Image (cartoon, rainbow, N blue to C red):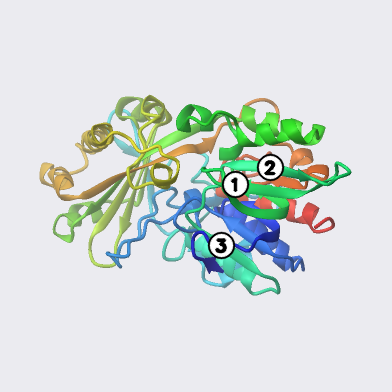
Amino acid sequence: MNSPAGTFAPSVDLAVIGAGVSGCALAAALRRGGWGGTIALLEIGRGPGGRAATRLSRRDAALRLNHGAPLFNIRTGGSTTTPPSLLEPLHSGGWIHPWQGAIRSLHGDGQLADPIADGFSDGDLWQGNGGMEQICRGLLTLAEAQPGTSELHSSTLVRHLDPQPSAGGELTGWRLRDGAGEPVLHSRWLVLSGTLLAHPRCRTVFGWPEVPLQAAAERGGDPALEQAAAHLAAIDSAASSNLLLVLPAAVAGPWLALPWRLLQFSPAAQERWGLRRLSLQPLADGRCGLVAESSPGFAAEHRKVYGSRSSAAQLLGAAPDPSDEAAVLDALQAALAAALSGLLESSAREGLAAADRQLMRWGAAFPIASGPQPGLPASLSLCPASRIGFCGDAAAGPGFGRVEGALRSAEALAQRLLPVL
């Protein structure tokens, strides 16, 4: 399914921008629904996963670091009685397994306690088998098992969305262009599985002169698309600046001996240390990976500092000044050492100095619920006159802001798309 960056079919039936959970789930749901048209998934990152990605390295075969989410949860109960339909084939196919790690919380006084209700650690807990990105690889494999041509194009930036009308004014599809304005491909139908091209943060963070989806909606003249674009632009989200550490095996022992694999920070602890969550991730060769997720407040204070190895830095021109990046890394590392001062010996905390470290910033890590019905309403998830649809965790409904919402929104959009594709 993977194609070299820059090699594209000139035209496809469906282009999906974003190969995170929702984009990959949409491809799987459409294929399992019997649709055999051509699909191109266009992903800005180095591979599938989005915020459910796993940091891998060609030079370090043992490195597998879940740097966006260490696990995901599925809630049932009330009006939601069944899990997403794609969950079972992912499990039976060996792509995911139940989360087995212990979860504890840290309070503002530095004391450990039972888990808290953070919205991401209740219900049925799951993890990718061998890394969170296996969720998306499993979904793509489910899609490949059905008839139809699907291609994943990684390290691909789509910057411009051009609706293509016929001579009679009816929309015939979309032309997608990159940051230099060069054509990427033409598609009969288009789906945005994330909000980067729909939200004003692309102007404030990356300096774009306009929001691509809003500009397209203004040219298209479709009231439904204009409403969808306005609604997506109004959905706020919290960012996260994540510190990624890999401890050598020689100093990893005390960390691996801690009685938890996921540590939540209470609101008071977040206020004190600027951290939201810490996951311990043992590596196969005895090393230990640590992913310290910042609080939204910390991320907001450093909103223009991206990791120099991130896709945003390489494709969007958002690379930080090295001194700014080092300052954020130092601040997060100092906060981590201070927060765990009562849980680890000083020698173990000092072992952090031997860790390989990097910064990963998620500009829209968690959509924020506001109003009586947060998220994009289901009625606006598909705009048939404009041949465009939307899915992802910013969609209204069960699972809003979580992996579950990404799965459910993709399945729901597939059901609406199948009769019209």
Residue drawn at point x = 30 percent, y = 49 percent: 290
In space, the residues marked 2 and 1 are separated at their CA atoms by 8 Å
Q: Nearer the viewer, residue 50 or 187?
A: 187
Q: Which of marks 3 and 2 is nearer the N terminus?
A: 3
132 shown above or below 332: below
Residue drawn at point x = 52 percent, y = 33 percent: 202
Amino acid beneath label 2: Asp
The residue singled out by tag 2 in the image is: 162
In space, the residues marked 3 and 2 are separated at their CA atoms by 21 Å
In space, the residues marked 3 and 1 are separated at their CA atoms by 17 Å
Q: Earlier in the sequence, mark 3 or mark 1?
A: 3
Residue 359 image point, x, y percent: 32, 42
Front position among marks 3 and 1: 1
Mark 2 Cα shell of 10 Å, populated few (<14), some (14-19), many (≥20): some
Residue 362 image point, x, y percent: 44, 40
Quadrant of residue 216 within the rendered picture: top right
| One can see residue 24 in this view | no
The residue singled out by tag 3 in the image is: 152
Quadrant of residue 243 within the rendered picture: top left
138 shown above or below 346: below
Amino acid beneath label 3: Leu
Horizontally, residue 18 falls left or right of residue 245, namely: right
Instruction: Say whether marks 2 and 1 touch (CB < 8 Å).
Output: yes
